[in-house]
Amino acid sequence: MKIVLENLTKIFPSRNKNSGEEVVAVNNFSFTIPDGKLIGLLGPSGCGKSTTLYMISGLQKPSGGKIFFGDDDVTEVSTESRGIGLVFQNYALYPHLTVKQNILFPLQNLRGKDKMTKEAMLERAQEVARLVQIDELMDRKPSELSGGQQQRVAIARALVKMPRVLLLDEPLSNLDARLRLQTREEIRRIQKETNITTVFVTHDQEEAMSISDMIVVMKLGVVQQIGQPQEVYDNPENLFVAKFLGTPPINVFSGEVRGGRLFIGGADVLPAPGVPDQQVHVGIRPEGFILDPNGALECKLSNVEVMGRDVSVVSTHEASSNPFVRSIIDADNKVDLSAGAVRFSLKPHKVFLFSKDDEKRIRIEVK
Ligand code: ATP
């Protein structure tokens, strides 16, 4: 089931009628979520991702725009009638019911033509329990389960009505690091097996990048970029997106383009054909540095952190916007800390230029 968002907007009025500004939580969001895909809605706190999800679910009414599930305009349709499964951060299970009763609950409330026999309900509950791998835990109460298991029950409960669309709001936030990793892979597996169009809200870029077919990066209610995770990482359209994706984050320098060359702090670091002379922000991914005794970029060496396969070289540079420059190089390279300085050459495809005026990407012509 594809989902079409058409100029979707949500404005929260000011609480105080006489003063205070209204909040534009989501601003003119248009996007078609392809059938059977998992979309990650990503952005910092307050960027409007939950509000977008709540509008898709029907829990919140848009101030403007339309929502279609397939060809059906569902903008005015109630949450109950949209055919969605919802999973929240806090699993919201009924504590006095067993796992089985929790999963059966949505089916027992079906009325009219949707009403199911007891046997059919039990069979369906067993089927989704197997899918999320909790079929051995059916007689336990939620308090007798781990956080990861509780979240699986919540997912099973969301899936049991065979929704057209699955909506997940920060479903992993309450889990510890290891369970987060495991559960996100589970969600991906379940989504692939069921092929249900899924929207997943998170502020964790790594989480969104690892399981989404496409990510939508938002800032202050405005969509910044939509694309496949790798494509957005490799081709950020503005400085915000470049800074939001990647761990360690991208390094940002103050630079200048002069006569078709890029300079950082006086050093001529790369060709920049086709770019008019101007001051620029230069983003360099940590993996974009090459240790090179003849490299143009010289940094003051602060520390070298060995992380198994890779080495993180921590240095400083006067043109860097951050206190430290973090570069990741192969552990085979030996860095002499006593040298005091380190020189790098740069991988051109890991270097991005952004306008000082509007922070939009300035493309370097590739010949
Ligand atoms: P978080 O990760 O913190 O949940 P988010 O990206 O999901 O953030 P939203 O919850 O969608 O952000 O909120 C977007 C903006 O709308 C924020 O500025 C928030 O304060 C505002 N907002 C959300 N709900 C309401 C409301 N009911 N009344 C007024 N303002 C609201």
Image (tube, rainbow, N blue to C red):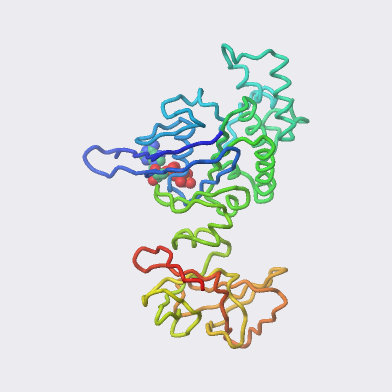
Quarter of the image holding residue 184?
Answer: top right
Which residue sits at x=37%, y=39%?
10
Up-down: is 224 above or below 120? below
Using the image as rendered, state which of residue 95 and residue 302 is in the foreground.
302
Quarter of the image holding residue 295?
Answer: bottom right
Using the image as rendered, state which of residue 90 and residue 135 is in the foreground.
135
Quadrant in which the N terminus is drawn: top right
Count of marks, rendered view: 0
Image check: 49 left or right of 34? Answer: left
Up-down: is 9 above or below 142? below
Up-down: is 210 above or below 306? above
Image check: 245 left or right of 115? Answer: left
Q: Residue furthest right?
A: 136
Up-down: is 100 above or below 193? above
Q: Position of residue 156 (x, y in %)?
A: 66, 31
- Rendering quadrant holding ligand 1: top left
Q: Position of residue 61 (x, y in %)?
A: 40, 31
Q: Residue furthest left?
A: 18
Q: Position of residue 62 (x, y in %)?
A: 38, 34
Image check: 27 left or right of 138? Answer: left
Quarter of the image holding residue 359?
Answer: bottom left
Q: Position of residue 285 (x, y in %)?
A: 55, 68
Using the image as rendered, state which of residue 157 and residue 357 is in the foreground.
357
